[in-house]
Image (cartoon, rainbow, N blue to C red):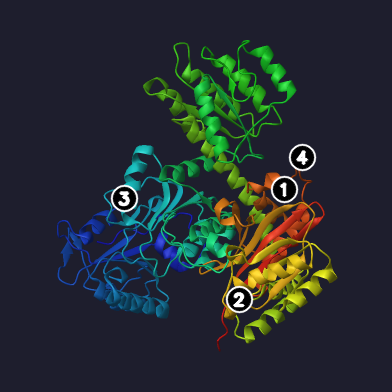
Amino acid sequence: MPHPPLATCTLPTGTPQLQALFAPRSVALVGATERTGSVGRALLENLIAFTGELYPINAKHNQVLGYRTWPSLSAVGLPIDLAVIATPAATIPEIIRECAACGVQAAIIISAGFKETGPSGVALEQRVLEESRLSGVRLIGPNCLGLMAPHLGLNATFATAMALPGRVAFLSQSGALCTAILDWSFRQRVGFSAFVSVGSMLDVDWGDLIRHFGDDPHTASIVIYMESVGDAAAFMEAARSVAAKKPIIAIKVGRTAAAARAAASHTGAMTGSDDVLDAAFERAGVLRVDTIEQLFDMAEVLAKQPLPTGPRLAIVTNAGGPGALATDALVLHGGELAEFTTATLQQLDSQLPTHWSHGNPADVLGDADATRYATTLRAIADDPQTHGILAVLTPQAMTEPLAIAESVIALAKTTNKPLLASWMGGDAVEAAREALNAGGIPTYDYPDEAARSWQFMWQRQERLRWLEETNRLAFTERPSMNEARAMIARHRATGRTLLTEIQAKQVLAAAGIPVLETRHAKSVEESIAIAQEIGFPVVLKLQSPTVTHKTDIGGVQLDLQDADAVRTAYQQIKKAVPPADFDGVAVQRMIQEKGLELICGCTHDAQFGPVLLFGAGGVMVEVLEDRVLLLPPLSPMLALDRIRQTRIHRALLGNRHLKPADMRALADVLVKLGDLVLACPEIQELDINPLLATASGVIALDARIVCGKTSES
């Protein structure tokens, strides 16, 4: 039974095929049936509410559930924007071919029975993809729940109910999770601009969807439940483009799935796939959360509150315990407590009882009324050291939950600083919670949850700054690294994949990275002669075509003061490996200046390409695991921001034993290292360990480079 045309509405921009998915004027259901308990029946029952034209397709019956049916898509004889397909997997290639012949622009393949069934399913899926590519018909699925567009009344799923309309686009690789989230959303009154089960992502992928909803006027934020990235380049490009204007919040499962692998460098051993994904999300502006609750909390918070201009949070509470709980959560996740100015402290002293906490958290005591809360909140909101406020309330005999909530709502109308609330308790505070939520104040059951949300808000602000810098870099010409590329090509032409330390340092020097002069000696006499020329004390290191971690086998001898010490060290190193693995030693000056040993490195990720590593170095590098990952290209700003996230950063700032390190020189090494690995994709793994950081600069004391094999080798 045809329906009237779709009512006029604002359509999203983008490709016509994706508009056909999310704003169709007509839908055909292939596999419509009235068989009880079937997917085809559930789909039809949901699509009946669609206000556009609906064409149920059933070759055996003239009617289904009282609605006229057509034997095939071609029999309809009228324009069809979207086909929803729920027939056996083997029929899908022919149906996609028929879609193309009938001018159908997009299809949702609900059916299972593809790659999850084994090799035959993989082959069948490939046939479907080929038909899609040939015809231009865009596909969601296969093996998916379907999609909803609540603003348009479109429910092309076999779920039991339609999602509420809202401003969140929810994209999920798990159909089962979709139904659970849908049920949860009704209780929490969470609404959606779209609700999409992507299934196997045979065609339409994350990049397509992110770009579409980035332009969708109904969508304020995009939340993603992700099991795999798929086309990483398309995802990164789309996310970088959209995240600058709309929050993208993702939960990615499989944090612990990455198995340990053998690697020829410390960097390779320390870089797990999940760590790389974290770095990619940061670079693309995507906010990664840990739980489903956080996923939607952040969509709500970012829609309701302005972003903070700085990281420092003030906590106002009528009980010390909840304030301490919020403080722990804030600090443990990298947040900062605001330090009130002297003027603010003096003002609070004049307003509050003598026994208030005299600091942050500001404990206004258990007998605080609405007036005391209001004056405290106003004083703290006016403090330039404060970037946001968390108001915490516990219900006590003299507490006025609703009146205090109204004071928070009133403050929100007069400040541009973000406000969060945690009204703890049950029925006694329920009316106050409803008022806060209605007033645009995100409200939490527990203060630690609120503090965590604050930290996510600051991350969002930080990532916007990184995105701006990343987009600037996209239009900045990078160095050609011609000399380094020529060196790499010569070494690969010999068939070697592991460069010697001396060769690796030559490549680094060609890239503009400071290195300690290192010379090759193949005999005791040559070693002594070089040592006397460069001056004692010296260091001897094993040179080997096979051994990668020299220290582990006694292949590094330090602080050699004279010729006898060099002779003894040479003989010890030679005995440490079989003759075939010994290619002499490297001789270099022993650095006397005090500094910190760091590691800089690179590995190649199968999805995201070159990934840089920075952290605490030396022989304990894999034990300390104090490191961050970075995706090139970099600027000094991006490099320094990531360096600040390590524990070793505090030591780099100096202490009574060490002068502050040259941070500009350190950032410059990371920038040039990123340029090197982008210009030389043949580099599979690279270590500078240690990179010595001192007040006068940085210098690579050791280096290792592993290249991919040539096509001939």
The tag earlier along the polypeptide, 3 or 2, is: 3
Give SS at disc 3: helix
Q: Is residue 23 visible?
A: no
Please tell me how crowded label 4 is: few (under 14), some (14-19), or many (20+) other residues with Cα within 10 Å: few
Please tell me how crowded label 2 is: few (under 14), some (14-19), or many (20+) other residues with Cα within 10 Å: many
The CA distance from mark 3 to mark 1 is: 50 Å
The tag earlier along the polypeptide, 3 or 4, is: 3
The tag earlier along the polypeptide, 2 or 4, is: 2
Q: Amino acid at mark 1?
A: Leu
Q: Amino acid at mark 3?
A: Thr
The tag earlier along the polypeptide, 2 or 1, is: 2
The answer to whether 539 appears left or right of 214 in the picture is right
Give SS at disc 2: loop
Note whether 265 is above or below 378 in the view shown.
below
The CA distance from mark 2 to mark 1 is: 31 Å
User: Number of marks in the image?
Assistant: 4
- Give the residue pinned by disc 3: 179
Can you tell which of label 3 and label 4 is closer to the viewer? 4
Residue at position x 47%, y 65% in the image = 261
The answer to whether 635 appears left or right of 374 in the picture is right
The tag earlier along the polypeptide, 3 or 1, is: 3
- Give the residue pinned by disc 1: 652
Q: Nearer the viewer, residue 216 or 335?
A: 335
Q: Nearer the viewer, residue 670 or 495?
A: 495
The CA distance from mark 3 to mark 2 is: 51 Å
- Give the residue pinned by disc 4: 656
Across and down, in percent, residue 80 comes to 35, 69
The answer to whether 578 appears left or right of 531 in the picture is left
